[in-house]
Amino acid sequence: MATYTNLDNEIFSNAALETFLKTLLPFNAFSSNFSPDPVQKGATVLVPLIASLTATTFGGSYAICGGSQSVVTVSINRHKHVPIGQNDLDAANSSRASLESFAAQQGRALALAVLQDVFTLCTTANFSLATAVASTALDVPQLRKARLDLNQNDVPSDPRALILDCVPMDALLSVTNFVQAQMFRDAGVLADGKVGRALGFGMYELNNLFPSTGSVMGFAAHASAIAIAMRYLAPQAGNTYSDARAVTDPGTGITIGLRDHFDNNTGTRYLNLEANYGYSVGLSTGGRLLKRTD
């Protein structure tokens, strides 16, 4: 059982949400439908996909429906949580000094569990292979191949993202011409070791979150490749939680749940952070995999 110092739900939930959001940055690459609206596990949500339209010669009337919005039905059937607790003795002998730091760890742990779950979609059963190379040998030609594959399948050039494991990302940072070009554009490459964009892709780095059995080390994708939905899982009527709330980022709608209750039998206070969500393949042509051969 994890413990932390003096439970303060407002401080705790805000600090946890901040780190949860930072860790979930790769979700910016995909189609999403996030909301604090309560929904029961197993419900479905429609996630709109970013689609492309075609131009045509004007035929004398503007009253023409030129296209329709594509949607993916996503079941809210995934539920991750991080349980924490504190007994009476710990509460009496602790301070509030490390509360925000501990909350940040919990928010990150929850986000990593969600990320790893969503990236189980990154298999050759769902997306075609762009290229395979040793993870320590990734170079610009492999990125070009992924870009070319998407272009040849008429995948829109924006928004696109390239999500890489940390080993091939490190390999890219060892390519002199690539790094020099990036440093000329962005001083943060040297200061923070982060590459913002390359070849039209927004760049995101992971650490061992792709499926271990598929040798996947990277995923080049348009936003329509994966659809994600997230909702608040509200407790049933008649619950006896001392506090149960949705904690939401107003900018994105990303929401986690907080449940707080006390067990009189053990003298322990429990607080759970949870994520209630679902995901699905969007357009399989919108993504390409990069595999490692080592």
Image: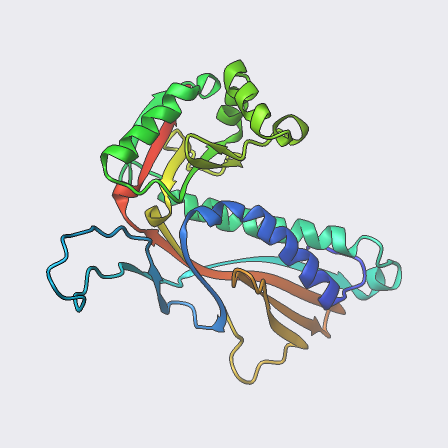
Residue 159 is left or right of residue 69, and the answer is right
Residue 293 visible in image: no
Residue 279 is left or right of residue 233, and the answer is left
Q: Quadrant of residue 277?
A: bottom left
- Residue sitting at 49 percent across and 38 percent down? 209
Q: Is residue 145 above or below residue 101?
A: above
- Residue sitting at 20 percent across and 51 percent down? 55
Q: Measuring from the top left, give residue 45's x and y in whole percent.
A: 36, 66
Which residue appears farthest toward the bottom when viewing the image?
238
Q: Measuring from the top left, give residue 147's x and y in whole percent.
A: 34, 31
Which residue appears farthest toward the left when viewing the image?
59
Which residue appears farthest toward the front when viewing the image?
60
Q: Is residue 35 above or below residue 78?
A: below
- Residue sitting at 58 percent across and 80 percent down? 239
Q: Measuring from the top left, give residue 138's x and y in whole percent.
A: 44, 20
Residue 43 visible in image: yes
Q: Is residue 265 above or below residue 129?
A: below
Judging depth in this view, the residue of 152 and 77 nearest the camera is 152
Which residue appears farthest toward the top when viewing the image?
176
- Residue sitting at 23 percent across and 61 percent down? 68
**Quadrant location of the C terminus in the rendered image:** top left
Residue 269 is left or right of residue 245, and the answer is right
Q: Measuring from the top left, give residue 113's x and y in whole percent.
A: 52, 49
